[in-house]
Image (cartoon, grey):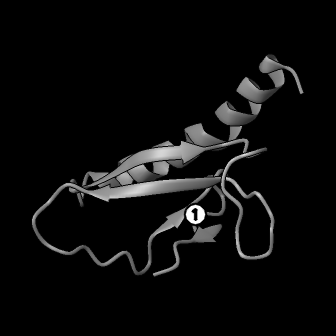
Amino acid sequence: MNNKTIQNLCFRFLYPCFCVLLAVGAFAQEILISEFVAVNEASLTDGEGDEPDWIELKNTGYSSVDLTGWHLTDDAGDLNKWTLLV
């Protein structure tokens, strides 16, 4: 996979996710995306040995934030595509 293909994949996936989280962030400004891996080929593996893409959220506030009902998406027609597990 060349760099242009990786950039296109990152843009197509991450840009809509950022837009959704930014929209949600207007109501919960303590939560930030602190890290992400959009093309995980040799990074962390999950319990099944797969190398999924991942994000890390950081709570910059002083109180707990309930992430129940938060979602990520890359499709404006399906805003609940990936539900955050809490």
Q: Is residue 57 left or right of residue 65?
A: right
Q: Secondary structure at mark 1?
A: loop
Image position of 1 with respect to 49: above or below: above
Q: Amino acid at mark 1?
A: Leu
Q: Look at the image and tell me in which quarter the N terminus lies.
A: top right
Residue 43 placement (x, y as % from top left):
68, 48
Q: Residue at x 10, y 65 (%)?
A: 62
Q: Outermost residue toward the left? A: 62
Q: Quadrant of residue 57?
A: bottom left
Q: Give the residue at x 70% y 68%.
A: 46
* Location of residue 55 with respect to 6 vertically, above or below: below
Q: Is residue 3 left or right of residue 68?
A: right
Within-10-Å neighbours for mark 1: few <14, some 14–19, many 20+: some
Q: Of residues 16 and 61, which is closer to you in this image?
A: 61
Residue 66 at x, y percent in the picture: 30, 78
Q: Which residue is mark 1?
A: 79
Q: Position of residue 29 (x, y in %)?
A: 21, 53
In the image, 34: left or right of 82? left
Q: Nearer the viewer, residue 66 or 35?
A: 35
Instruction: Judge left or right: residue 63 versus residue 21.
Output: left
Which corner quadrant holds the C terminus?
A: bottom left
